[in-house]
């Protein structure tokens, strides 16, 4: 009877915990009021949305906006009733402004931007409440842009105006360094991080950068997450870092709440398709105030693991999960995609988080092109829909706040999301990714609760539908949008 009562209490507590934390992260008041104002949807970098997406392939169609490769993320401006939904994008060579119309995507205007030495610079984007857009330009500068209406008599057009450009002070920048990640604090400050671990803060007028450098020569290959308390979460090839924004300066002092934790970083050479060593994911934040709070990444082991770090205070009675493990690690679980005998797995894409659940997709390509020079290193991603090179597997995990453990909820070995960042809709209970079936690029709809395929919508075999690392995003009116190797694709109701 005592055991029965204990289990009843545990089940009730679990259900209560799920209900109590089922809301989205707090809204940043300095971001655009839109479905997707910045990379990974918001400062928590969860990649999930409260907006609805499609629920079946019936009556779906797609629109295509040609453009240069590749807009990793599209930043939506403020949504206004009775007006087209406006968004910004950044490709290798241009910054553009476009809008979704009922039956098309229209490019309003674009401008050329300085060619960065590293293709990753400029991948991330932030749109603020005034519809100003912040995008890295060149390698070590941040630009502020806005679309301005121009009219003369009956003739009307628009142009992109660069309001400000601010370079990181040269004393912080070594040759070959470049901006990797961009995010915005909850008091409206821009935070950027470079590949060499330089972290800088500036206000939205881009008056000046105040910078610090992470210790021990850390290398960064993904963007960053920020919470409402000023915690800035940066994963490197060596550590998971929390840098604290105090409201006036950046701090790495534990007295201000900063910390650094080691994790299993894996081999020193990037695996096929990976952008760097160590974790392949932008940190995602899990849990709101008053709950268990974590920062979530995939690690760099040959068999990748999902890793949860305590975000703020570590519980007083918490013991390290194993010998040699940092006490800040709350959980570490292998990602097998349903294969109990798996000895290797790779997930380059950021962990998709909603509530206490996290979903990862396989990016384990059969062929490596990392030995090729320059942009040719991405050949394996370009052909990630082809035959045996295409990876398969999706898996979801959940944190149990009662038993303080992570478990695998489900896995689906049949679904392929080769290279794009997945998303999910809390309104429809479906996860989405740009997938492939027999070489044909698709939109995949996956039941968030069971992992079963809900639907798939074919897009075509051409590279113009290849997501090529880009985020699958939930837009307005139930739309799905994504950057592709050839431009922008929107999937919508007819």
Image (cartoon, grey):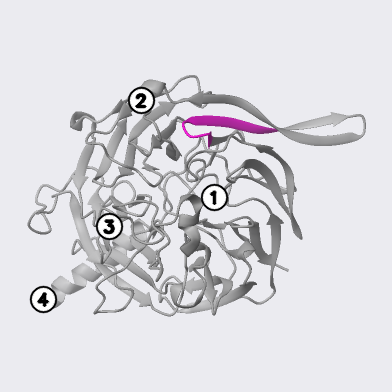
Dot placed on the residue nearer the N-terminal end, 1 or 4 = 4
- The foreground one among 190 and 460 is 460
Residue annotated with mark 4? 3
Q: Residues within 10 Å of mark 1 (few under 14, many from 20)?
A: many
Q: Are marks 2 and 4 in contact (CB under 8 Å)?
A: no
Total number of numbered discs in the rendering = 4
Q: Disc number at residue 300?
A: 3
Spatial CA span between label 1 and label 4: 50 Å
Q: Disc number at residue 172?
A: 2
- Tell me, yes or no, if residue 419 can be seen here: no
Spatial CA span between label 2 and label 4: 60 Å
Q: Are marks 3 and 4 in contact (CB under 8 Å)?
A: no
Q: Is residue 469 magenta?
A: no
Residue 59 in the image, given as x and y percentages of width and height? 69, 74
Rendered-image quadrant of the C terminus: bottom right
In front: label 3 or label 4: 3
Q: Residues within 10 Å of mark 4 (few under 14, many from 20)?
A: few
Q: Residues within 10 Å of mark 2 (few under 14, many from 20)?
A: some
- The foreground one among 407 and 456 is 456
Residue annotated with mark 1? 73
Above or below, 128 against 40 in this view is above
Residue 469 in the image, given as x and y percentages of width and height? 49, 57
In front: label 2 or label 4: 2
């Amino acid at each position: 009877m005592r055991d029965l009562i204990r289990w009843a209490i545990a089940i009730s507590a679990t259900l209560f915990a799920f209900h109590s934390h089922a809301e989205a992260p707090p809204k940043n008041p300095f971001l655009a009021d839109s479905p997707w104002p910045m990379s990974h949807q918001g400062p928590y970098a969860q990649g999930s949305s409260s907006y609805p997406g499609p629920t079946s392939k019936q009556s779906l169609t797609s629109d295509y906006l040609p453009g240069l490769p590749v807009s990793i993320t599209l930043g939506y401006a403020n949504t206004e009733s009775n007006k087209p939904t406006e968004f910004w994008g950044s490709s290798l060579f241009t910054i553009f402004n476009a809008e979704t119309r009922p039956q098309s995507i229209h490019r309003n205007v674009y401008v050329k931007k300085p060619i960065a030495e590293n293709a990753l610079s400029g991948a991330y984007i932030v749109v603020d409440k005034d519809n100003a857009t912040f995008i890295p330009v060149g390698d070590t500068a941040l630009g502020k842009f806005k679309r301005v209406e121009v009219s003369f008599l009956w003739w009307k057009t628009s142009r992109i105006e660069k309001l400000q450009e601010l370079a990181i002070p040269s004393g912080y920048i070594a040759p070959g360094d470049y901006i990797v990640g961009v995010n915005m604090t909850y008091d409206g400050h821009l935070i950027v991080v470079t590949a060499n671990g330089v972290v800088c803060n500036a206000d939205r007028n881009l008056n000046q950068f105040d910078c610090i450098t992470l210790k021990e020569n850390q290398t960064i290959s993904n963007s960053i997450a920020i919470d409402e308390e000023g915690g800035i979460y940066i994963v490197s090839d060596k550590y998971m870092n929390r840098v604290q924004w105090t409201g006036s300066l950046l701090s790495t002092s534990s007295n201000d709440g900063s910390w650094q934790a080691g994790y299993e970083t894996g081999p020193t050479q990037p695996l096929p398709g990976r952008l760097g060593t160590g974790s392949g994911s932008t940190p995602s934040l899990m849990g709101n105030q008053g709950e268990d709070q974590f920062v979530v990444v995939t690690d760099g082991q040959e068999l990748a693991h999902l890793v949860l770090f305590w975000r703020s205070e570590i519980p007083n009675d918490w013991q390290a999960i194993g010998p040699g493990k940092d006490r800040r690690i709350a959980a570490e679980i292998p990602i097998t995609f349903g294969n109990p005998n798996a000895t290797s797995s790779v997930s380059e894409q950021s962990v998709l988080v909603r509530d206490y659940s996290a979903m990862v997709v396989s990016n384990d390509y059969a062929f490596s092109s990392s030995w090729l020079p320059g942009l040719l290193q991405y050949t394996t991603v370009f052909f990630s829909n082809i035959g045996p090179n295409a990876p398969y597997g999706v898996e979801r995990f959940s944190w149990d706040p009662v038993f303080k453990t992570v478990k695998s909820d489900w896995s689906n070995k049949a679904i392929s999301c080769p290279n794009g960042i997945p998303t999910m809709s809390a309104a429809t209970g479906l996860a989405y990714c740009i997938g492939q079936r027999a070489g044909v690029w698709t939109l995949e709809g996956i039941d968030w609760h069971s992992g079963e395929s809900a639907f798939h919508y074919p897009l075509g075999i051409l590279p113009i539908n290849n997501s090529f690392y880009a985020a699958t995003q939930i837009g307005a009116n139930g739309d799905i949008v994504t950057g592709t190797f050839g431009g922008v694709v929107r999937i919508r109701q007819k």
